[in-house]
Amino acid sequence: MFNFALPARAAMPAAFRLILALAGGLSVAAFVAPAGVSAQAVVALVNNSPVTTFDVEQRMRIASMTERRRLDRKAAIQELIDDQVKLIEARRVGYRVTEDGVEQEFIKLAKGARMSEREFETALQRAGIQPSALRAKIRADLAWVVLLRDQARRGSQVTNDELESEIEARRRKDSMITEYVLRPVVFIVARGASPASRMAAANNVRARFNSCETGFDELRALPDVAIRPPVMRTSSDLSPQLRQLFERTPVDRMTPPSPSSEGIEIVAVCSKKERENPASQRSAVAVDLSERKITANARNYIETLRKKVDIRYR
């Protein structure tokens, strides 16, 4: 099967669809939070502020259901510790995350899920997530954004030498990409019909096909044949196997038949054009290098901040 379609943008974020699906069959009462921290085991202290087993369970749920991340218990504890570290540092440098700021971000998430704030809170609770736990994560995330922005001003800029070196490396590796115009054709296998006969029909058409301008006229007269609209793809969009296949197939010719979920599929290669790879262009390289540098600096920064606070594991 020629699976070279790009993923469609979902109307609603997948994470929120997951919350709603899970929420539908669960009872709010099943996930009532304990009355206080004392009812929970403390797994760590950050400057005497506790991280509890309930916090850990909530963070693992948030990661799984709203961010599609798998987070084990150890990683969840570390995230929660880091959140407190970020908030401590933010207060130290004079930045205070306001409740209004947290609420605005929470409402944005609700709107992204096409819900009111109250509906979103109910959906979270039914999925086993306390809204307060998500707000706590938002609070730490907002503090971290400000801290990283301040760090970026102090030394995350990409130097001209770094930029030129990366551009040269990318050009040596893959300076050009190929842009294809492709047109899939499906020989539908009816219920009870022989796939072998449709494979033979596809091979017969492929042998005669020699023009994307006129070759499809004959196909339109054939029964149980679907001619799909043309699609444009670049070599960077394709898997290595498909890239090799389309490179070997001349323009105005078709690929060998392949079974698909709909029947037997062949693809006409209607044009090939080479152009400069956008990934090697200066602006794209600069953005990519800057993001990588910020990510690396963020890892070093959080490690430095951890050393400034008293962290005790229980």
Image (spheres, rainbow, N blue to C red):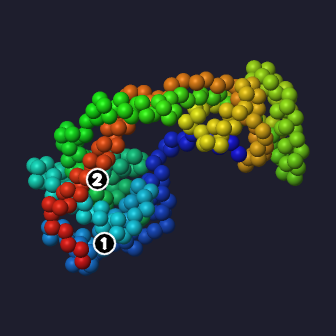
Dot 2, how many residues are within 10 Å of its Cα: few (below 14), some (14-19), or many (20+)? few
Residue 159: give x, y in percent of width and height.
27, 33
**Marks 1 and 2: which is nearer the front?**
2
> Picture coordinates of residue 38 (x, y %)?
21, 78
- Residue 249 location (% of width, % of height): 72, 32
Which residue occupies 83% across, 38% down? Answer: 202
Left or right: 91 in relation to 161:
left
Element under disc 2: helix
Question: Dot 1 surroundings within 10 Å: few (below 14), some, or many (20 or more)?
Answer: some
- Comparing 272 with 176, the one in front is 176
Residue indicated by mark 1: 54
What percent of the width, then of the height, locates residue 127? 42, 64
Please give the name of the residue rendered at 84% of the width and 51% of the height, measured from the top-left corner: 191
Q: Residue furthest top?
A: 213
Res. 124 in view? no
Left/right of residue 224 with respect to residue 118 in the rendered view? right
Q: Amino acid at mark 1?
A: Phe
- Amino acid carrying label 2: it is Arg
Is 196 located above or below residue 165 in the figure?
below
Earlier residue among tags 1 and 2: 1
Which of 219/2 is in front? Answer: 2
Q: Is residue 229 left or right of residue 301?
A: right
Q: Residue at x 48, y 32 (%)?
A: 172
| SS for callout 1 | helix
Q: Which residue is mark 2?
A: 299
